[in-house]
Image (cartoon, grey):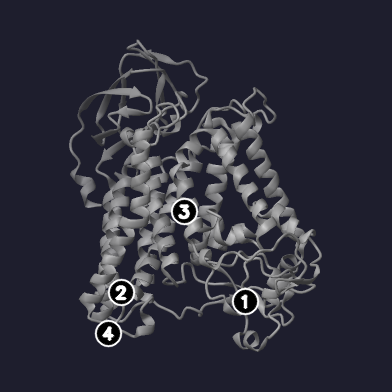
Amino acid sequence: MVFQFFTKDPGNKYIHIRNFRYGKDPSVIRCNRGDTLHLTFSTEDTGHSFYLEEFDIDAKISPARDMVDVFKTSDPTQDSYQARELVFIAKHPGILNYLVSKSNYRCHVWCGPMHAFESGKLVIMPNTLLIFSLGCIAGILFLWITGIFTNRVSGRDNNSGYNDILKKEGIIKKLLISRWPQIILTIVAMIMIYIVILTSLLGTKMSGRNLGVLLMWAVWLFLLVAILTPFFGRIWCTICPLPFFGDLIQRRSFFNPSAGKTNGYNNRFYGFSLKWPSGLQNNWIKMFFFLILATFSTTMVANPRVSGFAVIMLILVPTIMAIFWELRAFCRYVCPVSVFVGPFSRMSMLALRNRSQQVCDNCKASYCKQGNVKGWACPYSLNTGEIKENTDCGMCFECLRSCTYNNVTLYRRSFASELGNRNYGEAWEAIVVFTLAIIYCILYEGHWPVIRDFVNILDKKNWDLFGIYALVIWTLSLVIVPGIVYFLSFSAVRLSGIKLSVREVFLASSGSLLPIGLMLWIAFVIPMLFVNVTFIIQSISDPFGWGWDFLGTANIPWHQFVPRLIPWLQALLVLSGLILSLRNLNNTWLHEKLASKHLFTITLPIAIFITLTSVLMIFFFTN
């Protein structure tokens, strides 16, 4: 922290901020600690505000007026004062003066459907967080390299460190075997989906006050990305309401598996029970739908009606498919959510596996896959003895109920312990979710108004720019980034001289993108929730925006949740992702027992790519 003692003397900065839909100019204010900022404002269209919570400032800007009304964010009920020039010192109180280098200023006056994207950055030098993070990256690289050449690569066998959670016949196993908890939670999730649909379609058009939008894209997305998937894998699939009606159509029961024969399974299923075409049994269809939703994500977030209709389609499609195709064909081959939870569930600390491979090998009945009177045939058509990773298993726990040998269990294991990819489909999935994490961070949290012009088809009707944006997303996700990873894999083979195919190195290298990709997704959803906590509380009290106030919280003032902490959390997540990705990159090749030189050269190209990505994202989040 020596650079803290080389700060420049404070001075005066005079800055005019031009406000417009949906941005501010300048969108970044850089100054030195202790500088006195003199801000003036103008607007080119409607009313706006300059909301800087860390400095207790909310300046309301009106058209054709030089004066602004200045409120306190801590208590907006206090009398405001008018000023032609807003003056404050760029200095946080106490120890935060040395820790907080970046703050976001936002708009707190609704000015259109893309209002939530209007923001800018205040960066106070010296940038403690940036220098700290870059120093950490240098240290991580040093430890990674020395670990390779001193044989201190912290690897372990892919199956070691697994602790059997269900080893004792306790309450957890009873709850998992019983269908009641699962059905109750699924019904609760269905009720939440129903609330999302109703409030999205009938509620206010202001997305920041629409309960449906907030529940889906702030609460549910945060829970899915930051908690459920990292810690519990595909546990969301256990209670997901999307296949709810489809399962009911096929089974005609929630509790008692029907004995019978359908397509070789030991249960009676209803509907046509057609086999899914063998040529489509891959990841490409669901990746296609995932990219469609990703392309129109800003429209769904900004327009509650679009969001509501998208949710309706996500319920109708699996329900209709269940009439024609067997089991959960939608979940296996079409569901866009599985493109996220599938790859990243491999990072989770929870895994469903068999206890003894020998028992599975000797079992001829395969009740876990075929079903019996105790459990339905696996909806994902999996044999527990063949499950080696979390990607495919939706954790419905039917195998736990149907196995007559008590050979199915849940394991607790180390975080991010699965390595590599099995095939090109999985590799492309990993690269797509990694790429979209970066795109989403830039699109939703970046300060560049020109980028938002490319996605604004709601009130600006920029369909030509939107076409370019869509082309960029699809090309980056499916062609450019996979091409870069493939080229780096080719370079690693040539550089190392090891007799490995480029395909092997590509599958291993793409798998190492998952830890850093997951951390970037978490860094993306944190501000989505933290910024909107107050709006969620308001909207619960007035779910349709009709002037109700059930809980007395509909009109509480807006406050962000620990805004000073957000850049630090994001930086720490990037650093954690870098550590885990480099560790997994090394661990992928442990079975080859390579010499240190060969291990270094085979991992160096993709390690450089992951490190450069981390550096760029550190600059983005902190500077």
Vertical placement of residue 326 versus 95, above or below: below
| Rendered location of residue 81, percent (x, y) | 41, 14
Distance from Cα at disc 4 to Cα at disc 3:
41 Å
Q: What residue is pinned by disc 3?
A: 288
* Observer-nearest of 433 and 18: 433
Residue 356, quarter of the rendered image: bottom right
Q: Residues within 10 Å of mark 1 (few under 14, many from 20)?
A: many
Label 3 vs label 1, nearer the camera: 3
Distance from Cα at disc 1 to Cα at disc 2:
31 Å
Vertical placement of residue 623 versus 535, above or below: below
Q: Secondary structure at mark 3?
A: helix
| Rendered location of residue 543, percent (x, y) | 64, 31
| Three-letter residue code for mark 1 | Thr
Label 4 vs label 2, nearer the camera: 2
9 with respect to 521 (left or right):
left
185 with respect to 452 (left or right):
right
Q: Secondary structure at mark 1?
A: helix
Distance from Cα at disc 3 to Cα at disc 2:
26 Å
Given contact means CB atoms under 8 Å apart, are the residues at marks 4 and 3 in contact? no
Q: Residue at x 21, y 49 (%)?
A: 3
| Three-letter residue code for mark 3 | Phe
Per the rendering, the mark at residue 384 is 1
Q: What residue is pinned by disc 4?
A: 595
Per the rendering, the mark at residue 502 is 2
Mark toward the start of the polypeptide (4 vs 3)? 3
Per the rendering, the mark at residue 247 is none
Q: Residues within 10 Å of mark 4 (few under 14, many from 20)?
A: few
Mark toward the start of the polypeptide (1 vs 2)? 1
Q: Residues within 10 Å of mark 2 (few under 14, many from 20)?
A: some
Given contact means CB atoms under 8 Å apart, are the residues at marks 3 and 2 in contact? no
